Image: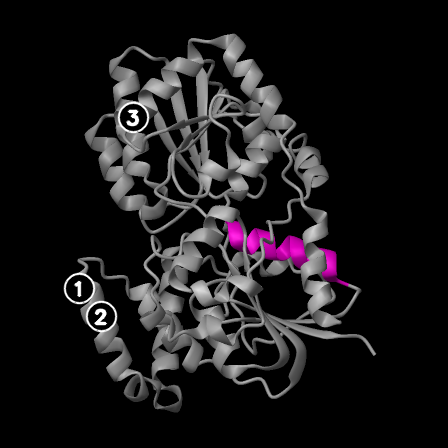
Amino acid sequence: MSKRILFVMNTLGHAGAETALLELLNRLEGSCEIDLYVLMGQGELVSKLPPGVRLLNRKFSHCSVLSAKGRMRMAGTVVKALLRRATCLRLFPYLCRNLLAMMGKRRVQFDKLLWRVLSDGGMRIPEEYDLAVAFLEGGAAYYVADHVKARKKAAFIHIDYGQAGYTRELDRDCYLSFDALYPIAEEIREKFLLAYPECAPRTHIFHNLVNREMVLEKSLQGEGFTDGYQGVRILTVGRLTSQKSYPVAIEAMKLLKDAGCMARWYVLGEGDERRALERQIGEYGLEEDFILMGAVENPFPYYRQADLYVHATRYEGKSIAIEEAQILGCAIIASDCTGNREQILHGVDGILCQLSPGAVKEAVLRLLGDGPLRERLRQAASCKRVTYEEDINLLTELLK
């Protein structure tokens, strides 16, 4: 009799963790029975699910979680969860307590509060599974810990736990309920264990699974850039969110232009920061120099055609965008932060710099002015190990 696994995810929007989940599901398909429950019941990547995966959501929207229509639908989902089973009344003390704690730190993150609402107000699954996997922090972890029946439970950790705004009070110590915990990088493991030191014996690195052959193949398909620009192209791939620090990149582009650098900076991704970023771009007069291209179906030709790839973010787990840039041999500049430090060896296969407009500008000028260094970084990046096929054994061992 085949084993049964339940995966729980917050959304299926176009982002790194969701992409990593799809690759993992593709690897597991056929070896066991796989169910998937998505708390938000929404996301454009649902069309990419392997045919053997059973989606449990009674209703599901293909609408992007980053679009205006998608945000409206998410608001409706939250309201329904608040009303279902009197969730709003039961969680009122929890919400007030954690909101006050956030206000005390001057960092209010409503999404962190609402994941508990979506978990407690979500559908209930009567079946018992051999293994239940929370593939993301927040709602997915709460749901698997509190509302799923399974012989074994596992949770993935994709971010710097404290930097992202999570606390044990917010989580209600949910990670103590899991048999195995899978940070996706060593530095992510260290940050998580600062909050949950007693979980160390059952915490193991499980790297993102990346399909190298698919990335290389798709980079040769499609057009990529079509604007006919003949100068230097700088590329960034990522959602338009505060984590990605695009205001720093925009200001860096302004400094580059003031220094006489002939370049264009392109961003592939969508998100709720678009309007604010467009205002900043307009204020600096960079409408022709810093281009928000939105999300694209196939980003890989753009990597291949770019002169530089820049990933200047506040924090990361382990960026799939950086891994894709490495596979395609990009010269990479990244901010010196959690996640990026583990993926890039400074001066060997990329450049790490401070997260400031001046530091990013100087790193760009350094690489553009040193062709041999740029070529060495490209060659080293393309040889970087980004696939860890053996990590999937961590899950199969739990099923024994």
In 3D space, how far apart are the residues under numbered discs 1 and 3 (Cα atoms)? 31 Å
Residue at 27% from the left image edge and 28% from the top image edge: 357
Q: Answer above or below: position of 133 versus 336.
A: below
Q: Answer above or below: position of 250 versus 165.
A: above
Amino acid at pointer 3: Ala
Badge 2 element: helix
Picture disc at residue 99: 2
Amino acid at pointer 1: Met
Amino acid at pointer 2: Leu
Circle 1/circle 2 CB separation < 8 Å: yes
Count of number-bearing discs: 3
Indicate which disc, 2 or 3, sits on the residue closer to the N terminus. 2
Report whether 382 appears left or right of 115: right
Q: Residues within 10 Å of mark 1 (few under 14, many from 20)?
A: few
Quadrant of the image occupied by residue 59: bottom right
Quadrant of the image occupied by residue 127: bottom right
Q: What is the span of residues highlighted in magenta in the rendered image?
A: 16-29
Picture disc at residue 103: 1
Q: Answer above or below: position of 10 versus 56.
A: above
Question: What kind of colouring is applied to the model shown?
Answer: one colour
Report whether 272 appears left or right of 39: left
Picture disc at residue 372: none
User: In x, y percent, where is residue 60?
Assistant: 54, 70
Q: Which residue is mark 3?
A: 252
Q: Main secondary structure of the magenta part?
A: helix
Indicate which disc, 1 or 3, sits on the residue closer to the N terminus. 1
Residue at 39% from the left image edge and 19% from the top image edge: 364
Q: Answer above or below: position of 256 versus 292.
A: above
Badge 3 element: helix
